[in-house]
Amino acid sequence: MAFNETLARLRKERGLTQGQLAQKLYVTRQAVSRWENGETTPGIDMAKLIATVLEVPIGQLLDMPDQAMCQSCGMPLTDPAEIGTEADGSPAPEYCKHCYAGGAWTYEATMDELIEACAPFLVQHSDGMTLDEAISFMGAILPGLKRWHAVQENERRYGAEVRRKYGDEAMDESNKKLLAMDEATWNTKEELELLIIDALKAAMADGDPAGPLAQRMCQMHGQWISMHWADGAYSKGAHLSLAYGYLADARFTEYYDSRAGEGATQFLVDALVIYCG
């Protein structure tokens, strides 16, 4: 589906008029109308803002081809010879060999550093794209890829509080730890998150935040938090401080309550108060 058709569909699905969308984007209604009529197309920076306002991945908005791409650099994975490998030599179908080989990342870099390194190659293999456009395009695509999405979520969940309480270095180290995770460790972290929700449901059914089910759940939660934080950053005091922050942040309350039931966040905090002592 073309950009103009996708934009019109997404806007209508969200119950917005052209004027209402224009207000959210700080443009005129006529500009939105021209986009939807196919008369003009917004630049990549405006497309990024539109995707944010409509809460969709920018790839969906731009009607990018439905093909596999490296979940680190965005390289199309159409050639089997370009696919990365796990430690046992088996294919790692989500990553290219330039990013992931032998079960490990081939480089250590921030997302910005990767964009700066790869953008010139995108220009070289594109039809008239400038370097600035390539950098902006990659800046829109990479945050939605698996490797970088974890960092974005880490920042969204913990960034403001950790940077305020412990400084930028602590949060930057946490992000580096996530980026350095191999696929097996990443999958363990994801599975542990699901197990915590199941354990929270069981502990709530038991009804005792001091009971063995609740305290085991707290231990699992601590393991999960430690996988996000820099080495040596975890302590029960920091864990408890984070838990109190859950109650003050609607995002966390919604996260736990929507998955484990109403009151789950409060129960988790009550259990952590006992666990952390």
Image (cartoon, grey):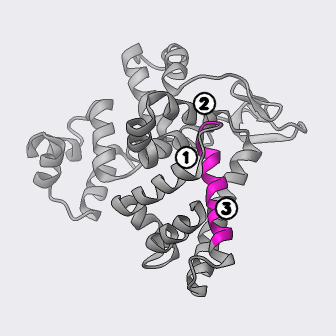
Depth check, front residue: 1 or 59: 59
Q: Of marks 3 and 1, which one's residue comes earlier in the chain?
A: 1
The answer to which image quadrant residue 197 occupies is bottom right
Question: The residue under label 3 is which amino acid type?
Answer: Met
- The residue beneath circle 2 is 75
- Examine the rendering and report whether any part of residue 44 can be seen: yes
Whole-angstrom CA distance, mark 2 to mark 1, is 13 Å
Residue 261, x across and y down, in percent: 48, 79
- Examine the rendering and report whether any part of residue 74 can be seen: no
Residue 25, x across and y down, in percent: 18, 43
Helix, strand or loop status at disc 2: loop
Q: Is residue 219 magenta?
A: yes
- The residue beneath circle 3 is 220
- From this viewpoint, which residue is outermost toward the bottom? 206
Question: The residue under label 1 is which amino acid type?
Answer: Asp
Near mark 1 (Cα within 10 A), the count class, few <14, some 14-19 or many ≥20, is: few
Near mark 2 (Cα within 10 A), the count class, few <14, some 14-19 or many ≥20, is: some
241 is higher (above) or lower (below) than 78 = below
Near mark 3 (Cα within 10 A), the count class, few <14, some 14-19 or many ≥20, is: some
On-image quarter of the C terminus: bottom right
The part of the chain drawn in magenta is 215-231
- The residue beneath circle 1 is 66
Q: Of marks 3 and 2, which one's residue comes earlier in the chain?
A: 2
Q: Of marks 2 and 1, which one's residue comes earlier in the chain?
A: 1
Q: Main secondary structure of the magenta part?
A: helix
The answer to which image quadrant residue 224 occupies is bottom right
Tell me whether circle 3 and circle 1 mark residues in contact (CB < 8 Å): no
Which mark is nearer the camera, 3 or 2? 3
Whole-angstrom CA distance, mark 3 to mark 1, is 37 Å
Question: The residue under label 2 is which amino acid type?
Answer: Met
Residue 169, x across and y down, in percent: 49, 27
